[in-house]
Image (cartoon, rainbow, N blue to C red):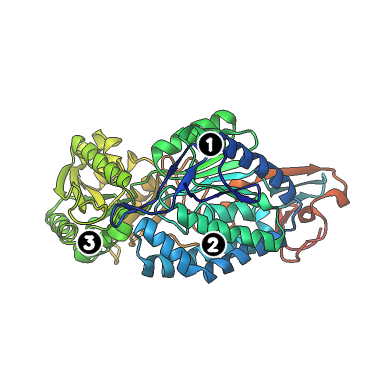
Amino acid sequence: MTYQRVLIAGQWRDPKKAAGFFHAVNPANKQPLPEVYPVSGEDDTDEAISAGKQAAVELRRAPADKIARFLELFAEKIEAHADILVTAANLETALPKEPRLKNGELPRTTDQLRKAAKAARELSWCRATIETSVNIRSMMGPLDGPVSIFGPNNFPFAFNSAAGGDFAAAIAAGNPVIAKANTGHPGTTLAFARLAFEALRETGLPPATVQMLYRIPPELGLRLVSHPHIGASAFTGSKAAGLRLKAAADKAGKPIYLEMSSVNPVFILPGAVEERSDEIAAELFASCALGAGQFCTNPGLIVLQKGDRAERFIHTLAEAFAGNRPGILLSAGGLDSVLEAVEILKSAGAVLMVGGKEAEGEGYRFANTLLRVDAKTFIGNPRDLQTEAFATASLIVVADDTRQMKEVASVLEGNLTGCVYSHTQGKDDGAYAALEPELRTKVGRLLNDKAPTGVAVVASMNHGGPYPATGHPGFTAVGLPASMLRFAALNCYDNVRPHRLPIELQDKNPTGSMWRMIDGQWTQRDV
């Protein structure tokens, strides 16, 4: 059997005692692709962890400029091989080559890498803090082992375990990475890993700074995130898998950062429905259908007040759901999970309006699905009625009044985003003032008058939120340099002699532009 090699300890090699083999599947025609990938066993996993631990020691001595240059060179190589990457991802995910992959996701990926490089070189991310009166100095620095990254299936570039946002943040913070490819797009991850390895060799960073496995058995995933030599882990995927990994990591005292489940509630206030009902319906359907609904910020819960205008809005939205062909889902497993989620919603009291079943035609497709429920029923069973259906599927909740809308917000679980549509001339200001404080605590990012899909890669972005959206509400997976702090440790130096201090904490500002907290003030001056 001919199969693809793994990248471990600076070598492309055959797996040792492979636990099995698999093919990627083209979701557009449900046919397996020809390449064969190994399932790595215990030997591969342990060797990658050991090599990563050694690389972490070596990488701590690497100048920030060299790490930054690696990230920049990697971005250049990605752009030079864009056609190869786009073709691979299109075959494995059925996501359109243009504009999604080539014009959207790939530029975002290289932009993330370059922003990570800028943060690594500029050094302010480490939050150097100096108290001269007691001669105590501290800063954020690399972890003591590699970061294992489990990438999702819905963003083969921007969240890829060997190139995406978690990868960029971990490397920029000075950590090696063990990339666990998503089974849905192993060939795309292989292409990224090859380019990353070329960039490593050209910049002279430790060869095991980037390692890559395609798949490991579930029990080895638990072993990986809880291993004594692992620095931290990042996971984007299902709630069930994420919680199993979190339990293993927590038990071992190892940090793990998770993005798992979010229905991203949208509240539409009465004045907004009166003012621009059709416009909002069109915008929401476009958001729900983007990427066949397989966005982590897909609006899966829509809340509005009962009335004739609300019924017109619901009718318009239902027509949009019914009148448009569903997109292609990423896998057969995704199809099954959506059907299961819809059945849970129906069993909890939701009434199916549109869709609710597998769609006819080629590829993995689920009919665009819209359900509705009254607010009283939702408030009585919020757990089941917040089940995430990862497709073009949303649940409408109809409330009696603003008070009941607020009560719906009060029983929400944590979400990545929450949105409020309101009247442009202020008719909804009172309702907004009542609702916002309740909603604010349930979401990582609060939006007004815009659909939640789309995540800008800017320093102020929060792509995180309370549980179960993520495993910790204090961190973001998007937005540099903040996302780097997940993969860093606080290092404190008490009365350490000046020449023994890291350059970031010495009296002289190492770059001249680095921001440091010196005696209670952020400044770029020398001590």
Q: Which mark sits nearer the N-terminus, 1 or 2?
A: 1
C-beta proximity under 8 Å, tags 1 and 2: no
Residues at marks 3 and 1, CA–CA distance in whole angstroms: 49 Å
* Label ID, residue 311: none
Q: Where is residue 120 drawn, in percent x and y?
A: 66, 59
Rate crowding at label 2 as few (under 14), some (14 to 19) or many (20 or more) other CA atoms within 10 Å.
Answer: many
Dot in front, 3 or 2:
2
- Which residue in the protein does label 2 denote? 112
Q: Viewer-nearest of labels 1 and 2?
A: 1
- State the residue in front, 89 or 415: 89
Which residue, given by chain and number where applicable, does mark 1 sit on? 41
User: Residue at the location (54% across, 71% down)?
Assistant: 80
What amino acid type should be assigned to the residue bearing mark 3? Answer: Ala
Q: Is residue 357 left or right of residue 503?
A: left
Residue at point 18%, 37% (across, down): 349
- Observer-nearest residue: 279 or 39? 39
Label 1 amino acid? Gly
Question: As displayed, is residue 411 above or below residue 100?
Answer: above
In the rendered view, does 412 fall on the left or right side of 252?
Answer: left
**Which x, y percent locates residue 402?**
25, 48
Mark 2: amino acid: Gln
Labels 3 and 2: the sequence-earlier one: 2
Residue holding disc 3: 281
Question: Which numbered disc flags the more N-terminal residue, 3 or 1?
Answer: 1
Badge 3 local density, few (<14 within 10 Å), some, or many (20+)?
A: many
In terms of secondary structure, where does tag 3 sit? helix
